[in-house]
Image (spheres, rainbow, N blue to C red):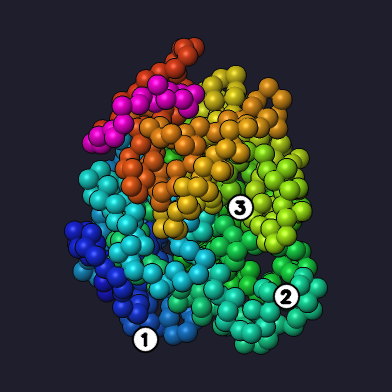
Amino acid sequence: MPSPNASADPAQLLKRVDRVEEPVRVGPLLYFRGCDRGRLKLAAVLVRPEQLEPPPVTVEEQAIEPEVLLRHDGYVGLRYEFSLPLATGGSYTVGKERFNVAGVPEDGLRIAYLSCNGQESGDQQRSLSERNTMWRRLVQQHVADPLSLLLQGGDQLYADEMLDVHPDVREWREGSSDDAAALPLPAAVPEQLRSYLLKSYMQLYNQPALAWLLARVPSLCMWDDHDICDGWGSLSAERMDSPIGRAVFEAAREYFLLFQLGATSNHLPRICQDPSGATLTWMAVLPGVHLIAPDLRSERRPERILGPAGWAALEDCLTASEEPSHEEHHVFVLSSVPVLGPRLSWVEAVLRWIPGAQKYEDDLRDQWQSHAHREEWRRVLRDFLELHERRVSPVTLLSGEIHLAARATMVAGCGPLHQLIASGITHPAPSRWYARVLGGLARMGEAPLPAHPIQLHPLPGQRGIYAAERNYLMLERRQGRWSAWWELEHSGATPPLELSRVAAPVASVTGQPPANRRSTSPHVPTTDGRTT
């Protein structure tokens, strides 16, 4: 049998549920694998006690045999690979339960983007009725108008409390870099880390709204620091390269691969660009759409964001998107950390002189705009801008990480390069005061590339640059044109923002709210990010 929550009536998910039972099994969890010859290629993962017989999985009356991905703590992870008709979708059956999948329609394609699914401490003790408010709303929207894909842009699991599994791991976290580097790896720690992650992922994906949706909408995921531990990549090299640091990373990577990519180190999905696994950068191609997700964590160091393998994989993806047959594919790039944002170097300089403020240094160094990454930031901006300006269809950047909803544009000769930020589907929103202060900094603008200034804008229908509400982003293609809108916890759906280029050189183009959705604001979207 599948997880009981995976097959629950969606109406039941909208009731107040504060706790779930200790999970005995999890899944199915559905993953996108590609499109080929009119078929939508998928994988489903189930985790269950080892002593139980694998459940029968059938697709189009054909039995699908499982592959074992993992055995640990008496549990086994099983993967089933299959395909469905691309345009119309279909269903698959686990035991006696049927799961409907939407497919990838030519018109009316809907994709959701989300990030930051947790909080730094105490996430497993939260009331689920409060925690998963936005997940339940996403379930409602899927029931009303099905989603074809779920993009998860980082921090799907907040694994920070994994560092409490052993006193020496806590000392590694809290001591100096030199002390952390000198600590030996206790023999028990690798298994303790793996056990913590297995239990945490099972608790997370057994929550009713998540389990129901993740069984029916295929996911594409990229990790960020909290999927490992807070600040991973911006911590000192001595700390990360220490025996305990490597054990933390390897355990987090193993369980990220299992639960977020449905894979193992030895058998990465074909969407991953580097067979060696040095980077987990991936590219997925759907009809009319390219999705690219650079891995900003595997090779990160305090002085760099991408390593050699990461840069090679990203540039291969961008080159593939320039092929003539892909000219009319809209390119969405998932950068877990926002690419377009305000200048931070002077903020970093000020914090160095404020007592106690050094604890924020890792958070600032995590950003593309940090003084430590200035040249690398310019390089990635040039790459995205050149692709955006050479193609018939535009490039749009998708990001999370900051626990706010926001958007930005960079000036380009062919029309603006958009950055859409959706962060905090369950992470508590910061204060409105914090959002206003950050918005004040953002109004100063930035121009790391001459003649291509970056500007942050309020969301459609909003006044402040940053929306301090939990949120997720919706992307929709109708009649060949893409638009986006944010779903905000208290303000509801924003008016749509047009992403496709106008056919003629006009100042702006008005749009209508997507079908089956009422606009909550009189503001009308424009292609340059302004509202009228």
Q: Is residue 286 above or below residue 51?
A: above
State which region is magenta: 516-532
Residue at position x 26%, y 59% from top? 99
* Comes first in the chain, label 3 or label 1: 1
Q: Residues within 10 Å of mark 1 (few under 14, many from 20)?
A: few
Question: Which residue is tagged 2?
Answer: 175
Q: Quadrant of the C terminus?
A: top left
Of labels 3 and 2, earlier in sequence is 2
Residue 448, image quadrant: top right
- Which residue is drawn at the image coordinates 74% and 83% (left, top)? 184
- Residue at image coords 38%, 69%: 126
Give the foreground label among 3 and 1: 3
The foreground one among 373 and 43 is 373
Q: Earlier in the sequence, mark 1 or mark 2?
A: 1
Q: In the image, what residue type sits under mark 3?
A: Asp
Looking at the rendering, which quadrant does residue 484 occupy? top left
The residue mark sitting in front, 1 or 2, is 2
Element carrying mark 3: loop
Q: Which residue is mark 3?
A: 295
Callout 2 environment at 10 Å: few (<14), some (14 to 19), or many (20+)?
some
Q: Position of residue 143 (x, y in %)?
A: 23, 49
Residue highlighted by disc 1? 51
Q: 467 or 159: nearer the eye?
A: 467
The reply to whether discs 3 and 2 touch (Cβ–Cβ < 8 Å) is no
User: Who is closer to the viewer here, 122 or 240?
Assistant: 122
Mark nearest the camera among 3 and 2 is 2
Q: Nearer the viewer, residue 478 or 347?
A: 347
Q: Can residue 213 be seen in the rendering of this structure?
A: no
Query: Would you place residue 63 above or below residue 199 in this image?
Result: above
